[in-house]
Amino acid sequence: MKTQKLYFCSKINEDFAYSKQFFLKKMKEQNLKELVISEAVRELRTDIFFCKAAGEAGERGDDYYSCGKLCKDYLPRNGKNGCCKHRGYCYSPGDEFILGIDGKLNKTK
């Protein structure tokens, strides 16, 4: 299964990454011809994670914000223990592009 690329946009919401289709819809709603977006780059080897069930970030080893048996949404991937099914990645902004209303991406200078 191929994953969909995600992008950030400070004009729409700088904290969350969304698909190109999301931004095209927002552009039509706001009558924009182009929008500057940044490619979302997955952060590797970090203690921070994103909980898809709670919709917020957590930190490994933190009893309050960590994923585990204390969480009401905890659901181990293997059905017994370990990594939760809802555990996701965090992303940071990468290369910038200009997204046109036609859906084409052009690299910024």
Image (tube, rainbow, N blue to C red):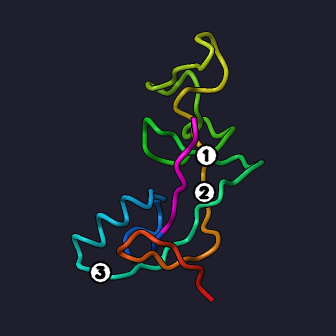
- Magenta range is 1-8
Relative to residue 6, is residue 14 depicted above or below? below
In-front residue for pair 42/26: 26
Mark 1 surroundings: few (<14), some (14-19) or many (≥20) residues within 10 A = some
In which quadrant of the rendered view does residue 18 lie? bottom left
Give the left or right position of residue 40, taking residue 45 as reference: left
Q: As shown in the figure, which amino acid type bears the numbered disc 2?
A: Tyr
- Classify residue 8 as left or right of residue 77: left
Name the disc covering residue 32, or none.
3
Secondary element at image label 3: loop
Residue named by callout 2: 91
Q: Residue furthest top?
A: 80
Residue 24 among magenta residues:
no
- For marks 3 and 2, give the CA distance: 25 Å
Q: Is disc 3 surrounded by few (<14), some (14 to 19) or many (20+) residues within 10 Å?
A: few
* Numbered badge on residue 57: none
Instruction: For marks 1 and 3, give the CA distance.
Output: 30 Å
Q: Residue at horizontal 58%, vertical 61%?
A: 40
Q: Amino acid at mark 1?
A: Tyr
Percent position of residue 84, x then y: 58, 26
Residue 96 lies, in percent from the top left, at 58, 77
- What residue does disc 1 label? 89
Say above or below: 52 vs 5.
above
- Tell me: 95 left or right of 44: left
Q: Amino acid at mark 3?
A: Leu
Image quadrant containing the C terminus: bottom right
